[in-house]
Amino acid sequence: MIALLEDPTLSAGEIADRLDVSRPAVSGYAGQLDEAGLLSRSDGYAVEEPETMLVLLVRYADSFDGDALRLAAQADDLITHEPR
């Protein structure tokens, strides 16, 4: 999730390389996130409700690893607000 929030254009292979895991591992976790309604896999990977995901990651960053803490530190730069 953090990798996709930072760069929404990443492919499964790029995520696997970045995390040093196999593509099947990425695919398996992506399937679980898709079932939970957090990720769409219809055309590549897309985070559903990215602002909500970012808020949750920032709120609970200390429960995750250094990547979540780093993302939390740059959250202001990642959140955009568009008037309705």
Image: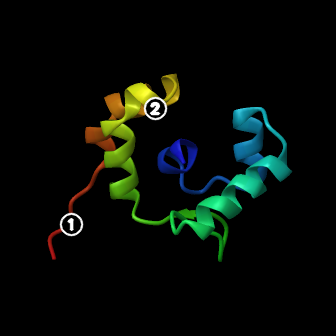
| Structural crowding at the residue carrying mark 1, measured as other residues with C-alpha within 10 Å and reported as few (<14), some (14–19) or many (≥20) | few
Q: Quadrant of residue 76?
A: top left
Q: Nearer the viewer, mark 2 or mark 1?
A: 2
Q: Which mark is residue 71?
A: none
- Measured along the vertical axis of the image, is residue 43 above or below residue 1? below
Foreground pick, 8 / 37: 37
Q: CA distance from mark 2 to mark 1?
A: 25 Å
Instruction: Assign a secondary structure to mark 1.
Output: loop
Image quadrant where one finds the C terminus: bottom left
For label 2, the residue is 68
Residue 47: x and y, percent?
Answer: 50, 61
- The residue most toward the left is 83
- Measured along the vertical axis of the image, is residue 74 above or below residue 33? above
Residue 43: x and y, percent?
Answer: 65, 74
Q: Quadrant of residue 27?
A: bottom right
Residue 43 as seen in the image, left or right of residue 72: right
Instruction: Name the residue rendered at 52%, 42% in the picture.
Output: 2
How many numbered markers are drawn?
A: 2
Instruction: Name the residue rendered at 49%, 44% in the picture.
Output: 6
Inspect the image, locate mark 1, and give the three-letter code of the amino acid beneath it. Answer: Glu
Residue 9 as seen in the image, left or right of residue 64: right
Residue 81: x and y, percent?
Answer: 21, 60
Instruction: Name the residue rendered at 77%, 38% in the picture.
Output: 17
Q: Which mark is residue 82?
A: 1
Instruction: Name the residue rendered at 64%, 52% in the picture.
Output: 10
- Measured along the vertical axis of the image, is residue 73 above or below residue 52? above
Inspect the image, locate mark 2, and give the three-letter code of the amino acid beneath it. Answer: Ala
| Structural crowding at the residue carrying mark 2, measured as other residues with C-alpha within 10 Å and reported as few (<14), some (14–19) or many (≥20) | many
Residue 34 as seen in the image, left or right of residue 52: right
Foreground pick, 15 / 27: 27
Residue 2 as seen in the image, left or right of residue 28: left
Instruction: Assign a secondary structure to mark 2.
Output: helix
